Image (spheres, coloured by chain):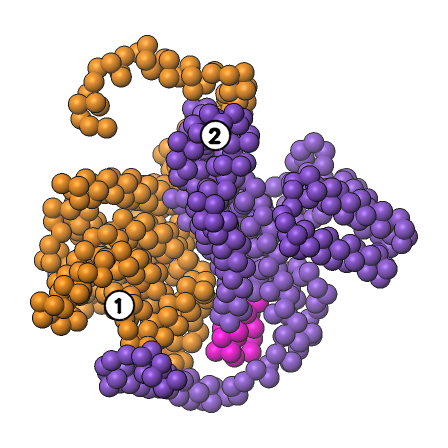
Chain colours: A orange, B purple
């Protein structure tokens, strides 16, 4: 739809809207029956939910107030807000994860806009990843906080962006190896990618928990959080590699042949000719992958890391606020939903934008 | 021969050898370290532990298992639990997903909007969170005496979900032989019919009716019985029908809900991928809507749908491993217990990864076979 079409007054006239509604709801007897059945279903589901969530809910107060009311206890979310955001990070130092979250989200918003897609942005990500690691662990600004104490939404966003950021360069190498004419490297890449993609992420996290401490020299000294991040980076790189490979396959061979004819070597060809085009093609796919990865970070709860989901769950085990699981899960779900739904809308917009800029 | 290998190996021989050597060295280093650590804490590497008795109970197992049976049997029970959840999950998610996908294309604005919201909410929240929600819901149901019931045949209780099902009595070896013979005869007929020029829907239907009739007759002929059991409240518990434990019910619900949303999207995209012109042309030929769907649109849509559903099934199988977080004794949960009680975590996890790889590869091989058939038939006609 062009802007002129969208602004066309006729499409917004009420009679047209009414006609669309009439056709969409009551065009045939069957259609009318479906409408009635759907309305009945909604009438059965929505009122109790509305009563529980809004009308009978307790918005402020203590757990005693909540126990008195039959509805949801949103006061619990207010009381546990800090814990769900930061978990066991020392309260006096919680400005650090807050700052990290802020920087990561700000950079994410910048990255989302195609006009900022420059080489400098990649550099910015590297700097931000390193800086946020130092900020979280406090190497430059003592006291240091061991990563076992990191938690909440901060650790979810941190693990997600750091692992995705580190997995992408690895994935590009893997994709290039899988497409290369060198049989040995190709086989290595295929074995690695298929092995990772055939294994559930839970198994990979158990490897991080049980095998890495034995396999790495002095592995016991590495925090659980860091071990998990190493394995998650390797695991995700296999998925990213497959998406990048799809982009590489879409570039006509004439491009690299022409580059070779100009005297460019393999790396220069890839860096200057093939990869810029291939990566541009796979950006929507990468966004979808990133959304899936954000949801997948919740698996950290399985190995006892206090990510957003686990922090929300354990906030309902506080003796003062015992058993408000529904509210805790709803709040965590809302955060995940806002981030991921926003991401998927963005991905749709981006696809349209890229197609339009291609046509130009 | 040698030339072929050289061609496969390609250029940059030294670089490749160096990279491969580095990878081998890395794994040797890791392996060496692991062996050393294991020696230090007094564990002998190897798969001998599989024969040793496992001193833990399994909440629910499709095969008889008690504490003291070997670890191999425990792992088999876990594997069967995983397969049970994955297979049932795939079937139910497909049924619900196709229904939702068709509903979103029904042309009814309200229904389509409702499905849209269902899909968006389910898709944009983590599966683990949904599982936590379902298990806390399943545990909060009332005791069997005050069970919530639907149509007096489905009961929701804190001891699990009770559903009606077939109950079998006095099943003997001849019954099984007869049923097996019938199944083989049916499959042989299908293969024979395909070899000899196709299988019209009427003949397929007739053969299926004969198969089902034979199966029904096989029971009284061999003295076995099958009854449709409906659970009823008896004293403090509910008897009859099938009992799904809260953990299994929560896992199954979570998997079905999550993947029905994915499959609904796939079905919708697949049907929409068929050009409008196909509908118009079929209508011009005088076909009615059902025929257009069955003969023209679905065969083409399946080419888009099949590969995507395959990867959904594989994801579902892998995601059934989240059962470990809600206490359902699946493969991962049993392997984890095994690793913790024996200390043989390397061997146990190797086994886990090997089993999942085997499941994955066999499912994708089977679906690729089917996919090739769907795709080939399409291209042959064009």
Tag 2 residue = B282
Q: Nearer the viewer, residue A6 or B45?
A: A6
Asked if one can make out residue B264 in the rendered structure from this viewpoint, the answer is no
Graded by Cα atoms within 10 Å as few (under 14), some (14 to 19) or many (20 or more), the crowding at tag 1 reads some
Residue A1 x, y percent position in the rendering:
23, 28
Q: Nearer the viewer, residue A121 or B275?
A: B275
Left or right: B207, with A125 as reference point:
right
Which chain letter goes with mark 2? B
Q: Is residue B27 above or below residue A122?
A: below
Q: Which mark is residue A176?
A: 1
Residue B287 x, y percent position in the rendering:
53, 27
Residue B239 x, y percent position in the rendering:
77, 45
Identify the residue at image location x=41%, y=67%: A194
- Depth check, mark 2 against mark 1: the one in front is 2
Graded by Cα atoms within 10 Å as few (under 14), some (14 to 19) or many (20 or more), the crowding at tag 2 reads some
Q: State whether discs 2 and 1 lie on one chain.
A: no
Asked if one can make out residue A193 in the rendered structure from this viewpoint, the answer is yes
Secondary structure beneath dot 2 equals: helix
- What range of the chain is rendered magenta? B333-351
The stretch drawn in magenta includes residue B298: no
Q: Which image quarter holds the N terminus of chain B?
A: bottom left
């Amino acid at each position: 739809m062009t802007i002129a079409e969208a602004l066309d007054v006729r499409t917004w006239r009420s009679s047209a809207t009414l006609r669309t509604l009439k056709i969409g709801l009551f065009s045939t007897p069957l259609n009318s029956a479906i409408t009635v059945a759907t309305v009945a279903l909604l009438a059965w589901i929505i009122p109790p939910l509305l009563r529980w969530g809004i009308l009978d809910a307790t918005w402020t107060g203590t757990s005693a107030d909540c126990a008195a009311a039959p509805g949801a206890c949103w006061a619990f979310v207010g009381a546990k807000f800090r814990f769900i955001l930061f978990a066991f990070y020392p309260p006096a130092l919680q400005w650090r994860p807050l700052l990290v979250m802020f920087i990561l989200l700000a950079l994410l918003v910048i990255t989302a806009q195609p006009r900022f897609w420059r080489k400098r942005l990649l550099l910015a990500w590297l700097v931000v990843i390193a800086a946020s690691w130092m900020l979280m662990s406090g190497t430059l600004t003592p006291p240091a906080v061991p990563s076992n104490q990191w938690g909440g939404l901060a650790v979810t966003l941190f693990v997600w962006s750091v692992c995705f950021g580190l997995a992408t360069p690895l994935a590009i190498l893997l994709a290039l190896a899988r497409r290369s004419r060198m049989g040995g490297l190709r086989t290595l890449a295929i074995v690695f990618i298929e092995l990772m993609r055939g294994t559930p992420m839970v198994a990979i996290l158990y490897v991080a928990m049980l095998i890495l401490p034995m396999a790495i020299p002095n592995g016991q000294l590495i925090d659980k959080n860091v071990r998990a991040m190493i394995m998650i980076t390797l695991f995700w790189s296999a998925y990213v590699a497959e998406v990048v490979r799809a982009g590489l396959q879409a570039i006509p061979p004439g491009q690299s042949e022409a580059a070779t004819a100009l005297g460019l070597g393999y790396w220069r060809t890839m860096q200057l000719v093939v990869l810029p085009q291939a990566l541009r093609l796979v950006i929507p796919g990468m966004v979808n992958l990133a959304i899936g990865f954000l949801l997948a970070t919740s698996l950290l709860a399985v190995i006892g890391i206090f990510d957003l989901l686990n922090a929300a769950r354990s906030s309902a085990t506080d003796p003062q606020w015992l058993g408000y699981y529904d509210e805790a899960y709803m709040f965590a779900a809302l955060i995940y939903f806002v981030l991921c739904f926003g991401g998927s809308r963005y991905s749709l917009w981006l696809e349209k934008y890229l197609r339009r800029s291609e046509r130009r | 021969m040698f030339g072929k290998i050289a061609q496969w190996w390609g250029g940059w021989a030294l670089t490749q050898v160096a990279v491969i050597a580095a990878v081998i060295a890395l794994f040797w280093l890791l392996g060496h370290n692991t062996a050393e650590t294991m020696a230090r804490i007094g564990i002998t590497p190897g798969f001998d532990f599989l024969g040793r008795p496992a001193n833990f109970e399994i909440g629910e197992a499709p095969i008889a298992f008690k504490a003291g049976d070997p670890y191999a049997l425990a792992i088999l029970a876990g594997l069967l639990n995983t397969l049970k959840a994955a297979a049932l999950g795939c079937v139910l998610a497909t049924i619900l997903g196709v229904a939702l996908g068709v509903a979103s294309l029904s042309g009814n604005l309200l229904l389509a909007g409702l499905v849209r919201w269902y899909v968006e909410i389910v898709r944009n929240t983590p599966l683990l969170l949904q599982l936590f929600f379902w298990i806390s819901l399943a545990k909060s149901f009332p005791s069997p005496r005050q069970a919530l019931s639907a149509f007096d045949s489905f009961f929701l209780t804190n001891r699990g979900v009770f559903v009606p099902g077939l109950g079998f009595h006095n099943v003997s070896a001849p019954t099984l032989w007869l049923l097996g013979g019938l199944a083989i005869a049916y499959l042989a007929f299908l293969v024979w019919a395909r070899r000899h020029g196709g299988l019209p829907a009427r003949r397929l239907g007739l053969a299926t009716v004969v198969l089902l009739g034979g199966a029904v007759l096989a029971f009284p002929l061999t003295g076995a019985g099958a009854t449709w059991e409906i659970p009823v409240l008896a004293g403090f518990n509910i008897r009859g029908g099938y009992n799904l434990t809260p953990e299994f019910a929560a896992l199954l619900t979570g998997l079905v809900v999550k993947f029905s949303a994915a499959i609904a999207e796939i079905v919708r995209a697949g049907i929409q991928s068929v050009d409008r012109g196909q509908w118009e042309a079929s209508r011009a030929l005088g076909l009615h809507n059902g025929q257009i769907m069955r003969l023209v649109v679905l065969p083409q849509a399946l080419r888009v749908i099949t590969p995507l559903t395959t990867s959904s099934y594989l994801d579902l199988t892998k995601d059934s491993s989240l059962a470990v977080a809600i206490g359902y004794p699946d493969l991962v949960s049993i392997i984890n217990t095994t690793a913790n009680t024996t200390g043989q975590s390397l061997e146990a996890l190797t086994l886990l990864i090997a089993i999942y790889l085997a499941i994955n590869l066999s499912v994708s091989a089977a679906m690729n076979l089917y996919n090739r058939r769907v795709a080939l038939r399409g291209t042959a006609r064009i």
